[in-house]
Amino acid sequence: MKKQIIFSLMALGLMTSASYAQVTKGAVLIGGGLNFSSTTSSYEFDGKEVENVETKYTDLGLTPKVGYLLTDNIAVGVMVDFSNSKITSTFENSEIESTANGIAAGPFVRYYTALGIFGEAGVGLGSMTTNGGGEDEKDLKSSLFGWNVGLGYAAFLNDHISVEPMIGYGSNSWTTDVDGKDSVEKNAGINFGVSLGIYLQ
């Protein structure tokens, strides 16, 4: 029994060492993945909160990124988020469904531990186009700002490729010019994702 425990601990140590060995200073990270979130937003118009409006977003995103390992623990880089959203808005018992497409880009920083677990934080600026929800409605174009923090795990398949599931918490805000006045929409919530990482030394 003791031998089995010792062998198990040795195997775990070797797996951990193999995983972390790829994350070293000077490596280049090339990655990309899918993420999902479901959130509810709030509105402000001309600086005042709009009540009796509930909007639910179901988002699916594609996020490519490129990073560089400054040290054995810290990576910095740039990521781009392409998102597609299904939107359901409820106002005075009326329900309107629409869709939106967005793109945002910005920096990220990631910190790795010796166990393969990492923390990541990033911000992004971009734009979003929302369809009008009807044949006679015009598309709305908005400026976009968002941030996200998350916790993930780098599971290496070989010397260079890893699968990286991650759970995060983020917030987005959209600002739309409506007849010279700002309409601001905000949401926040938990998101889930999985990506593929390629580490080149």
Image (cartoon, rainbow, N blue to C red):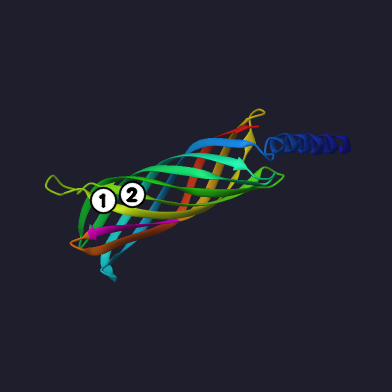
Quick one: which residue is furthest to the left in this view?
A: 136
Mark 2: few/some/many CA within 10 Å (<14, 14-19, 20+): some
Does label 1 or label 2 sit earlier along the sequence?
2
Q: Quadrant of the rendered structure where residue 85 is?
A: top left
Locate residue 95, reporting x and y percent: 21, 54
For label 1, the SS is: strand
Secondary element type, mark 2: strand
Quadrant in which the N terminus appears: top right
Assess disc 1: are there few (<14), some (14-19) or many (≥20) residues with their C-alpha within 10 Å of its C-alpha: some
- Quadrant of residue 26 within the rendered picture: top right
Distance between the alpha carbons at the discs numbered 1 and 2: 7 Å
Q: Is residue 132 magenta?
A: no
Disc 1 + disc 2, Cβ < 8 Å:
yes
Q: Between residue 179 and residue 4, name the one nearer to us.
A: 179
**Residue 96 point in image, percent of width and height:** 21, 52
Q: Which image quadrant: the C terminus?
A: top right
Magenta span? 171-177
Amino acid marked by disc 1:
Lys
The residue at which mark 2 appears reads as 127
Farthest-out residue, top: 158
Residue 19 to residue 191: above or below? above
Residue positioned 27% across, 68% down in the render: 51
Q: Which residue is mark 1?
A: 141
Q: Is residue 72 left or right of residue 108?
A: right
Closer to us: 101 or 135: 101
Q: Which mark is residue 118?
A: none
Q: In this orientation, which residue lies closer to the viewer: 9 or 139?
A: 139
On the image, the x and y values in percent for residue 103 come to: 37, 44
* Dominant secondary-structure state across the stretch colored magenta: strand
Question: At 58% across and 37% down in the image, what residue appears?
Answer: 29
Q: Amino acid at mark 2?
A: Ser
